[in-house]
Amino acid sequence: MKKIQWNFNNSYETLPSFFYDKIDLSPVKKTKWVVLNEDLAQFLGLDPEALKEEGFLPLSGSEFPENASQIAQSYMGHQFGFPSILGDGRALLLGEQITPKGERYDLQLKGSGPTPYSRNGDGRATLQAMLREFLISEAMFGLGIPTTRSLAVVSTGEPVYRERVEKGAILTRVAASHLRVGTFEWAAHSQIKENLISLADYAIQRHYPELENAEDKYFQFYLEVQKRQAKLLAQWMSVGFIHGVMNTDNMTISGETIDYGPCAFLDVYAPQTVYSSIDIYGRYAYEKQPQMAAWNLARFGQALSPLIGETHEKAMERVDGALEEFAKEFQREFYRIYGRKLGLSQVDGDDRKLIHELLEIMEKNSTDYTNTFVDLTLRDWEQEIYQRKDFFSWKEKWLKRLEKENPEEVEKRMKNSNPYIIPRNYWVEQALFEAKEGNLDLFLELWAALKSPYDYEKHKEKFRFYKEIFGYKTYCGT
Ligand code: AMP
Ligand code: MG
């Protein structure tokens, strides 16, 4: 029998017990493989064949990996602006797998059963929701956007009660860590400075080791987290991604995208778009995301305040200054990426105008966000929409600007920053519907295509086109 090659270590347990609860996994009896991410298994140093043969934890009858734990992490979160005590209500941290390169990744089971933090929830997850997180997180990885990843989905054979009776499933999530802004809020809430110091030192060691001996290291840490978030947000915006529930518990310290609940991608370019069924005031609309990230980072600064200023007031002055920097960093990244989407090597003031003019035309004409950039990349002006006066004169200006660039470089830049395909709402829903009915073909085809979204390949064309889903809505906690 082959060995899976677990290489677990649990540094999270070196934190004060205030940050977690040890629990016993509530067993699920009839688990079955639905999908396994073999590339990711290999990256983690695990043998996919052995995983399939022996199964691993969420599979019934399989062995608990050596040195693995069962931990529910404690955290808080500002949900839609209001603080509450949360914690892992339906997830279990097994520990950290050390990869052959010596990197450390959390393995977490999502949907594994109730924990002390489940409140009124059942601790479970539906097959459809876990496949959705699998597909979209892996699509984000394919797009080159920092994200938690998905190793596997297993079905539990147990019913999960939502609006209808659904099939239960468990996702194995892989993350640089599960430290959140909300974890720091939890530390601050304890009003014990040692908790905050332990957590900050742990986060620095794990994600920002270059700061370990830096002067003023906690403030430097704050600034570095902001920089990663500024880059991340610019990347989200550049592919039309809407997270949907940017609560502070869903913002990581590592800079990875986390918690794929009500997320979705723009079809037509409408900046006010909201898909989440519960976001009735549009707090987390597409265009609001950078602003909401700044709001979350302000909460992070508040939590860190005992470590970054002699008094709370002084700390908050520094936080305000840092947030101005965040806004600037976001703008720089935003224009750099959008410049590349238009083939530009550098972006000056006129180029910025050119970018905004295009976005305004797209909004006015309700053009498809992704496909417009693909059409520009392919210089495909066939459609009626591109014959209209506003677009036509914009195009002339743009082509003139491109004369200053090397044409081959332009093409390369554009192809590398304008995805040919994204996880279209229509195709995601179609694939999940069929998967729920027991047919995974479309799911697997879509997943395979989304591994290389920047390859302009003819056979992927089908995923460029879609039927608009009128009043499309996505959901939390499913
Ligand atoms: P989320 O909206 O996924 O970020 O979750 C917010 C909080 O609700 C977290 O503390 C989750 O653990 C908890 N939660 C979500 N769904 C469930 C569920 N079905 N059972 C228990 N807790 C849940
Ligand atoms: Mg969450």
Image: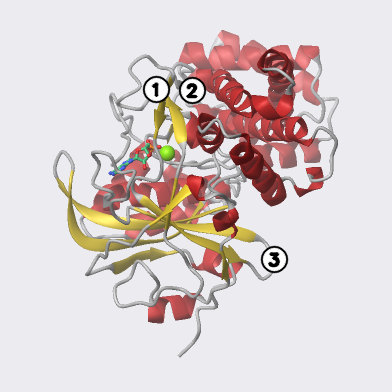
Q: Position of residue 136 (x, y in %)?
A: 45, 45
Mark 2 or 3: the one toward you: 3
**Front residue (pair 198, 323):** 198
Tell me the element at label 2: helix
- Residue located beneath label 1 in the image: 274
Say if residue 254 shows up in the picture. no
**Front residue (pair 143, 406):** 143
Image quarter hosting the N terminus: bottom left
Tell me the element at label 1: loop
Q: Position of residue 123 (x, y in %)?
A: 28, 49
Indicate if the residue with disc 1 has its beta carbon within 8 Å of ligand 1.
no
- Left or right, 374 with reference to 312: left
Give me the C-alpha separation between circle 2 and circle 1.
Answer: 7 Å
Discs 2, 1 touching: Cβ within 8 Å = yes
**For residue 102, which numbered disc appears in the image?**
3
The three-letter code of the residue at mark 1 reads Val
- Residue located beneath label 2 in the image: 286
Tell me the element at label 3: loop
**Front residue (pair 81, 258):** 81
Tell me what residue is drawn at x 71 percent, y 50 percent.
205
- Left or right, 141 with reference to 69: right
Q: Position of residue 47 (x, y in %)?
A: 52, 77
